[in-house]
Image (tube, helix red, strand yellow):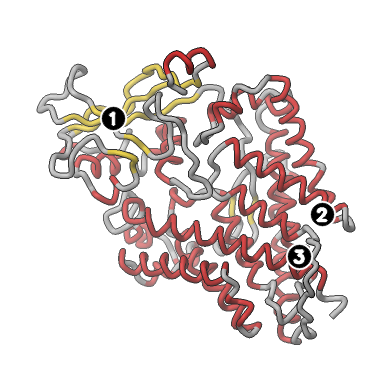
Amino acid sequence: MGWFTAPDYWLSRLVFQRALAGVYLVAFLTAALQFRALIGERGMLPVPRFVRRMPFGRAPSLFQLHYSDRFFAGCAWTGCAVSAMLAAGLDSRLPLWGGMLLWLLPWALYLSIVNVGQTWYAFGWESLLLEVGFLAVLLGNDEVAPPIVVLFLLRWILFRVEFGAGLIKLRGDACWRKLTCLDFHHETQPMPGPLSWFFHHLPRPLHRIEVAANHLTQLVVPVLLFTPQPVATAAASLMIATQLWLVLSGNFAWLNWITISLALSAVRLPHTAPSPVPGPPPVWYEVVVSAVAALLLWLSHRPVRNMLSRRQIMNRSFDPLHLVNTYGAFGNVSRIRYEVVVEGTTDAVPREGSDWREYEFRGKPGQPHHWPRQFAPYHLRLDWMMWFAALSPGYAEPWFGALVERLLENDRATLRLLRRSPFPPDAPPRYVRARLFRYRYTTWRELRETGACWERTFVREYFPPTRLAKVVQRP
C-alpha cells in the first residue's frame, strides 16, 4: 500500500470530492434551467439538427442515440440528484466499485451535454470539469487511501491550468508584459460582478502589483506543486487565495471554484479526528488506476507541445472525451467595452422615434443604473455569448437571428433567460432591433451625482428592425 497510496491525504480527498460535487451540481442545474431556449427542440441551436450532421465518434453523447426535451431534462436533473448525493458523501457508503460508478455517472451525463452543446458549451471550464471529473472516478473512497498517481495527475491539471494561462498572457497582449492590463480588464471583462467597479478604480500602481503577482502565481508557483510538503501546500494555498481574489472581481462561472477544488487536493490538511484505516487496495483497482494514469500521461504530450509552441492556443480539447485539454484565459484584453442592446416596439412602422423598449438581461450590462450582481458559479450562457457578439458579429451569426425570432414570438423559454421583457406575454413586439453601444464605468463623481455605474454611447446599428416574417440569421 505504501508505494501506491497516500493515507495522509484522505481528508484532502474528502474535501476535494465534496467541492467537485458542488461544482457538478451547479453545472447540471445550469443545463436544466437553460437548455430549452439554447439547444432544445425549438432552441436557437437545436440538438436534433446538430446530431444529424455530427458523427458519434466526434461527439459521443447519449443524445446522439435519442433526443427529446423531456429526455434531456431527465438527464440534467438526474445529474443534479447524483451530484447532491456525492456532495452528501454517498460514495463513501458504497463498495469501492460502486463509488467509482457513482462518480462515473455525472461525468458521462455531462460529457453528453457538452458534446451537443455547440457554441453555448465551448468554454474552457466545461472541458476542465470533465477532465477533473474523470480523475475523480479513480480517487476511490474510504475503503482505500488516495492513489498517489491520481493526486499527481490532479496537480498536473492544476499546473496546466495556471501555467498555460500565464504563458498565453506573456505571448499575447503586450499589456501583460507592461503590467497595464488591469487598467482595462475589470471594465471590459465578460461579466462584471458587484465589486468590479471598485476594482477598476483601485490606484494604478496597485494594478501593476496585481499583474506582477498574477505572473508569479501562474508562472512560478505552479512548479512548486511538485515539491515536498509543506512547500506544495503553501503553493496551492497561494493559488486558492488568488482565485478567491478573482471571485471577488468578476463573474467567471465555476472556473475559479473548480481551480480552488483542484488546489485543495494538493493541500495536506491537518486533522485531529482519527482517520479511516483503509485496507490494501484491491489488485483490480491498482491495475485500472495504473492503466488509466498511463494513458492520461501519454495523452498529455499534446497540451505540453501546445504550451511550448509559439502558436499556443487556449481552451482546446484534444479528444472527444475531453480527457486531456489545454487551458488559458485573456491572452488579449479589450481596451473598450461594447454591448449589444436589444429593443422591441409594438409600432406598426418602426422609426427612430418609435416607442423602443429595451430587453434587460440578467448579468450583462444594460441600463446604466443597474448595478452588476453576483451569479458565479452559476453560468449565464446567453449573457456570456452576448459579450462575444459585441466583440464581433461572427460570434453571433449562428444564433442571433434565432434569438430575435424567439423574442418576436414572446417565447417563454427564451424570456426566462432574461431579467425582464418589456412586453406582456399576450402582446409580443412587432419589431425587434439591436444596437451597439460603447460602455465605460462612471467616475466617483459621476456615481455620486447620477447613481449610475455605467455611461454608454451609441455606436451603430447592430441588427436592423425586423418583424417575424423577415428574420434572418446574419446580424
Instruction: Say few, some or many: other residues with alpha carbon within 10 Å of mark 2 (under 14 / 14 to 19 / 20 or more).
Output: many
Asked if the residue at tag 3 contacts the one at tag 1, i.e. Cβ–Cβ closer than 8 Å, the answer is no
Instruction: Say few, some or many: other residues with alpha carbon within 10 Å of mark 1 (under 14 / 14 to 19 / 20 or more).
Output: many
- Tell me the kind of residue under disc 3: Leu
454 above or below 291? above
CA gap, disc 1 to disc 3? Answer: 50 Å
- Element class at badge 2: helix
CA gap, disc 2 to disc 1? Answer: 50 Å
Asked if the residue at tag 1 contacts the one at tag 2, i.e. Cβ–Cβ closer than 8 Å, the answer is no
Give the left or right position of residue 467, taking residue 138 as reference: left
Which of disc 1 and disc 2 is earlier in sequence? 2
Instruction: Say few, some or many: other residues with alpha carbon within 10 Å of mark 3 (under 14 / 14 to 19 / 20 or more).
Output: many
- Element class at badge 3: helix
Q: Which mark is residue 151?
A: 3
Which quarter of the rendered picture does the N terminus lie within?
Answer: bottom right
Q: Quadrant of residue 294?
A: bottom right
Which of 193/227 is in front?
Answer: 193
Q: Quadrant of residue 341?
A: top left
- Tell me the kind of residue under disc 1: Glu
Which of disc 2 and disc 3 is earlier in sequence? 3
Residue, disc 1: 358
Residue at the extreme front: 272
Residue, disc 2: 233
Q: Residue at x 53, y 28 (%)?
A: 188
- Element class at badge 1: strand
Which of disc 3 and disc 1 is earlier in sequence? 3
39 above or below 147? above
Residue 452 at x, y percent in the picture: 43, 21
CA gap, disc 3 to disc 2? Answer: 13 Å
Residue 225 at x, y percent in the picture: 81, 53
Which of 219/419 is in front?
Answer: 419
Q: Residue at x 61, y 61 (%)?
A: 20
